[in-house]
Image (spheres, rainbow, N blue to C red):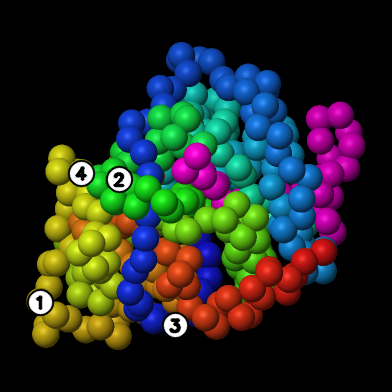
C-alpha cells in the first residue's frame, strides 16, 4: 500500500517475540472503550509536513476511524472477504487492535463532520504498532499465527521487537510526502521506545503462488534472511518460495512486480523469512519482513535524522 524506491538487499540483525494469539471477544460483542484507554496513549506528534501530521491515536474513537479506513482500503478497494460482523460494522477490526498503538496520518486541511456535527481533520493513513512488552502481556504477536518466530525471540532475549502491520493509505494520499511522513513516524516511535528490531507480514495480492512464482523466487534468491534469523512459516501454512531457479529468473521483471511496500522495506534494509503464507480472508500471500534497526540503510537514518528531527513539529 505504500510507495517506495529501488531494491537494496542487506543482511539482518537481531530479535523477536511471543506465542499464541489473544482470544477474540464473544460473537457480536466489541472491545469496550476502557480497555483501550488504560494504556495512556501519549499526546505526541511524530512529525508534520504542511497540513499532514503523523501521530498516535489518542482514544478508541480514533482507532475506530482507523478501522474504517482499513475497511475502505482492504474490503472495498481491494478484495478481502468480510464476515457478517465486519460487513455490519464496516470496520476492519481484530482482537489485537485494543492492545496496539495506532499510528495515524491526519490531513488538517480536510475536515469531516462527525456524528456530533463537529468538524474534525480526516484520517488518511494508518499503521498498527505492537511492541514486544505489550505482546508478552497479551498473548503474543499477530505474526506468530503465520510464522514460527519464537525461536528467534528465545535466542535474543536482550532485544526489543516491534511488529508493524495493517498499513494502508487512502488512494489520493499515496504520495512520496505521505510515505515519508509514515516512515518518519515509525522512526520516531522506534527511538522513543528503544526498539531493536521491526518485523511483520507484508502482502502480495492474490492467493495462487504459481501466478506469483517470479516474485516469490526473487525474494527467496535475493533477500532471504541469514540462517540464524530465518524464521519459517508454520508447517501447516508453509508455501515454498523457491519456485524458479535463480539462473532462469528475470530479476528485473520480478523486482518491478514487487508490491511497493515490500520494495520499500527492502530498500530500508529488511530481509525475508522462509516460506510464504496464503491468507484467503484478505486475498493475499504474505511474506515475513525482518528489519533490525542496526541494519537500517544509513541513508534512511541520515535523511530523517538520528533524532528523528527532519519533520518534527
Of the numbered discs 1 and 2, the one sitting upstream in the chain is 2
Q: Quadrant of residue 269?
A: bottom left
| Residue designated by label 1 | 245
| Residue designated by label 2 | 154
Labels 2, 4: front one:
2
The front one of 177 and 189 is 189
- Residue sitting at 70 percent across and 39 percent down? 41
Of the numbered discs 2 and 3, the one sitting upstream in the chain is 3
Residue 103 point in image, percent of width and height: 64, 50
* Relative to 236, residue 94 above or below: above
Q: Could you tell me which secondary element the residue under label 4 belongs to?
A: loop
CB of mark 1 within 8 Å of CB of mark 2?
A: no
* Real-space Cα separation, disc 4 to disc 1, in angstroms: 24 Å
Q: Is residue 143 visible?
A: no
Labels 2, 3: front one:
2
| Residue designated by label 3 | 6
Labels 4, 1: front one:
4
Per the picture, the main secondary structure of the magenta-coloured stretch is strand
Looking at the rendering, the stretch of residues picked out in magenta corresponds to: 108-133
CB of mark 2 within 8 Å of CB of mark 4?
A: no
Q: Could you tell me which secondary element the residue under label 3 belongs to?
A: loop
* Real-space Cα separation, disc 3 to disc 4, in angstroms: 30 Å
| Residue designated by label 4 | 234
Q: Residues within 10 Å of mark 3 (few under 14, many from 20)?
A: few
Of the numbered discs 3 and 4, the one sitting upstream in the chain is 3
Residue 23 point in image, percent of width and height: 40, 22
Of the numbered discs 2 and 4, the one sitting upstream in the chain is 2
Residue at the far front in the pictured view: 158
Labels 3, 4: front one:
4
* Real-space Cα separation, disc 1 to disc 3, in angstroms: 23 Å
* Real-space Cα separation, disc 2 to disc 3, in angstroms: 33 Å
Q: Is residue 150 left or right of residue 140?
A: left
Amino acid at each position: 500500500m505504500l510507495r517506495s524506491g529501488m531494491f537494496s538487499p542487506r543482511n539482518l540483525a537481531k530479535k523477536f517475540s511471543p506465542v499464541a494469539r489473544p482470544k477474540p471477544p464473544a460473537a457480536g460483542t466489541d472491545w469496550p472503550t476502557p480497555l483501550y484507554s488504560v494504556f495512556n496513549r501519549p499526546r505526541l506528534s511524530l512529525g508534520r509536513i504542511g497540513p499532514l501530521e503523523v501521530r498516535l491515536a489518542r482514544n478508541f474513537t480514533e482507532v475506530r476511524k482507523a478501522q474504517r479506513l482499513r475497511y475502505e482500503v482492504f474490503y472495498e478497494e481491494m478484495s478481502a472477504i468480510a464476515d457478517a460482523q465486519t460487513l455490519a460494522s464496516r470496520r476492519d477490526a481484530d482482537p489485537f487492535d485494543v492492545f496496539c498503538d495506532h499510528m495515524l496520518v491526519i490531513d488538517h486541511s480536510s475536515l469531516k463532520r462527525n456524528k456530533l456535527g463537529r468538524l474534525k481533520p480526516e484520517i488518511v493513513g494508518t499503521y498498527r504498532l505492537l511492541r514486544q512488552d505489550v505482546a508478552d502481556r497479551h498473548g503474543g504477536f499477530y505474526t506468530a499465527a503465520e510464522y514460527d518466530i519464537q525461536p528467534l525471540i528465545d535466542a535474543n532475549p536482550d532485544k526489543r521487537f516491534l511488529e508493524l502491520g495493517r498499513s494502508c493509505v487512502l488512494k489520493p494520499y499515496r504520495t512520496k510526502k505521505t510515505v515519508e511522513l509514515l516512515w518518519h513516524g515509525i522512526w520516531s516511535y522506534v527511538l522513543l521506545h528503544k526498539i531493536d528490531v521491526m518485523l511483520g507480514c507484508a502482502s502480495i495480492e492474490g492467493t495462487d503462488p504459481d501466478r506469483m512464482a517470479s516474485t516469490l523466487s526473487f525474494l527467496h534468491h535475493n533477500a532471504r534472511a541469514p540462517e540464524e534469523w530465518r524464521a519459517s512459516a508454520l508447517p501447516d501454512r508453509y508455501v515454498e518460495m523457491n519456485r524458479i531457479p535463480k539462473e532462469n529468473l528475470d530479476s528485473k521483471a520480478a523486482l518491478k512486480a514487487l508490491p511497493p511496500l515490500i520494495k520499500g522495506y527492502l530498500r530500508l534494509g529488511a530481509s525475508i523469512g522462509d516460506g510464504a503464507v496464503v491468507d484467503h480472508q484478505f486475498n493475499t500471500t504474505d511474506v515475513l519482513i525482518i528489519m533490525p534497526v542496526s541494519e537500517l540503510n544509513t541513508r534512511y537514518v541520515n535523511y530523517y535524522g538520528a533524532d528523528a528531527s527532519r519533520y518534527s513539529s
